[in-house]
Image (cartoon, coloured by chain):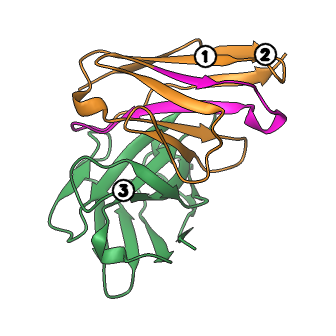
Amino acid sequence: EVQLLESGGGFIQPGGSLRLSCAASGFTFNSYAMTWVRQAPGKGLERVSGISASGASTYYADSVKGRFTISRDNSKNTLSLQMNSLRAEDTAVYYCAKGSQEYGYYYMDVWGKGTTVTVSS
Amino acid sequence: EIVLTQSPGTLSLSPGERATLSCRASQSVSSSYLAWYQQKPGQAPRLLIYGASSRATGIPDRFSGSGSGTDFTLTISRLEPEDFAVFYCQHYGSSPKTFGQGTKVEIK
């Protein structure tokens, strides 16, 4: 069974940093792109960042560019999101999602349950 | 950037009724790279449809997708109690892979 388990969320003050992780199992991790999607309270979905299967290609939404860094460790089947200079507007549930192929034109076919990030003073 | 506009914002229907959800793109979506997701309260989104009309694994055949270019539709032929949720469309044929704002299907 394909599973994605996020961790690392929590309560953090503005300007602080957090590192989210996503442990993947049940599929050949190094063959699929991966994505972080967030959802602010009561709002819709926003694709924050994506990474190709090899890690060579990355994407960042303008809202997080220069502050967030996505990475993956294919030897440990783990996806990460390093979040720096956090702002109140980064408060959201962060979902890890598996891409349907290794890069390019992929949709998200499996989602984790999410981890909550709250940025507040 | 392709902007996806979903309508209506909220759809109030009874179990057994037909639901028709619209997703309109600001530019043509290449090769029908359009997906639909369902999200129930407190849960993660779930993939329903990809390629505009292909059902994901395990999705009942009462869910169907159609459309091309800039106009796409998700149809639920007969609503079951477990179908009431928020539905999002997303294009994935160019960057950024944006989502629509969602349509809530609620029990009337």
Asked whether the residues under marks 3 and 1 belong to the same chain, the reply is no
- Residue on which the image places disc 2: B13
Question: CA separation, marks 2 and 1?
Answer: 10 Å
* Amino acid found under the numbered disc labelled 1: Thr
For label 3, the residue is A100
Element under label 2? strand
* Front residue of B61 and A30: B61
Residue B96 shown in magenta: yes
Q: Is B89 placed left or right of A30 in the picture? A: right
Query: Which chain is in green here?
Result: A
Amino acid under disc 3: Ser
Q: Colour of chain B?
A: orange
Precedes in sequence: disc 2 or disc 1: 2
Asked which secondary structure carries label 1, the reply is strand
From the image, tell me which residue sits under label 1: B20
Residue B81 visible, this orientation = yes
- Structural distance between the alpha carbons of marks 3 and 2: 33 Å
In the rendered structure, the residue with mark 1 lies on which chain? B
Please tell me whether mark 3 sits on a helix, a strand or a loop: loop
Quarter of the image for residue A29 reads bottom left
Which of B44 and A69 lies nearest the eye of the viewer? B44
x and y percent of residue B14 in the render? Answer: 84, 18
Q: Residues at marks 3 and 2, common chain?
A: no
User: What residue span does the magenta drawing correspond to?
Assistant: B73-97
Residue drawn at x 60%, y 15% is B9
Whether labels 2 and 1 belong to a single chain: the reply is: yes
